Amino acid sequence: MRTIAVTINGKAVSADVEPHLLLVDFLRRTLRLTGTHVGCDTSQCGACTIHVDGRPVKSCTMLAVQADGAEIVTIEGLAKDGTLHPMQDSFHRLHALQCGFCTPGMIMSAVALVQGRPDLTDAEIREGLEGNLCRCTGYHNIVEAVKDAARAMAGEG
């Protein structure tokens, strides 16, 4: 066992973890933050995407001990004071949720993608999200939601 200390969604957390414990399992099983999903266990689907120190990371390919000292944001940490993050709101309003399985990882990747880039083209959004798979194959509304949220995040929407 090894003790790690991280900040998750603004709260300090300290826990004893096995050295081989994946970060996604630490989040889901230990902390009960079940918004982060395990899809493929090979980092191809992106359902487990979270932010570690401000960067999107597929948490099924990172050990919990590697996150020691990091600041982590999960889908549960995006909404503030009961108000959805603009990306969450756009996904909801523009019907980009599909079945919902990929949605948390898709939103976390999209938030990182559009930071400071409100004018992304459809092609740039599709390329930026190619590490996140939607098995419902409904990418059109996802792209529209990302564009809408990008404008809102830039203060235009």
Image (cartoon, rainbow, N blue to C red):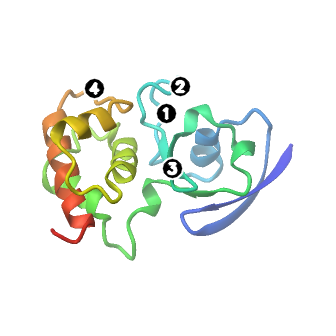
The label shown at residue 41 is 2
Tell me the residue that label 3 is attached to: 55
140 or 101: nearer the eye? 140
Q: Residue at x 50, y 27 (%)?
A: 43
The nearer-to-camera label among 3 and 1 is: 3
Distance (Cα) linking label 4 and label 3 = 24 Å
The label shown at residue 135 is 4
Tell me the residue that label 1 is attached to: 38
Answer yes or no: do the residues labelled 4 and 3 have beta carbons within 8 Å?
Answer: no
54 or 24: nearer the eye? 54
SS assignment at label 4: loop
24 left or right, relative to 14: left
73 left or right, relative to 85: right
Q: Residue at x 86, y 43 (%)?
A: 1
Q: Residues within 10 Å of mark 3 (few under 14, many from 20)?
A: some
Distance (Cα) linking label 2 and label 4 = 16 Å
Mark before the other along the chain sequence, 3 or 1: 1
Mark before the other along the chain sequence, 1 or 4: 1
Quick check: 123 above or below 55? above
Quick check: 64 above or below 119? above
Answer yes or no: do the residues labelled 2 and 1 have beta carbons within 8 Å?
Answer: yes
Q: What residue type is labelled 2?
A: Asp
The nearer-to-camera label among 4 and 3 is: 3
Answer yes or no: do the residues labelled 2 and 4 have beta carbons within 8 Å?
Answer: no
Q: Which residue is drawn at 21% across and 65% down?
A: 152
Q: Which amino acid does label 1 sit on?
A: Val
SS assignment at label 2: loop
Distance (Cα) linking label 3 and label 1 = 19 Å
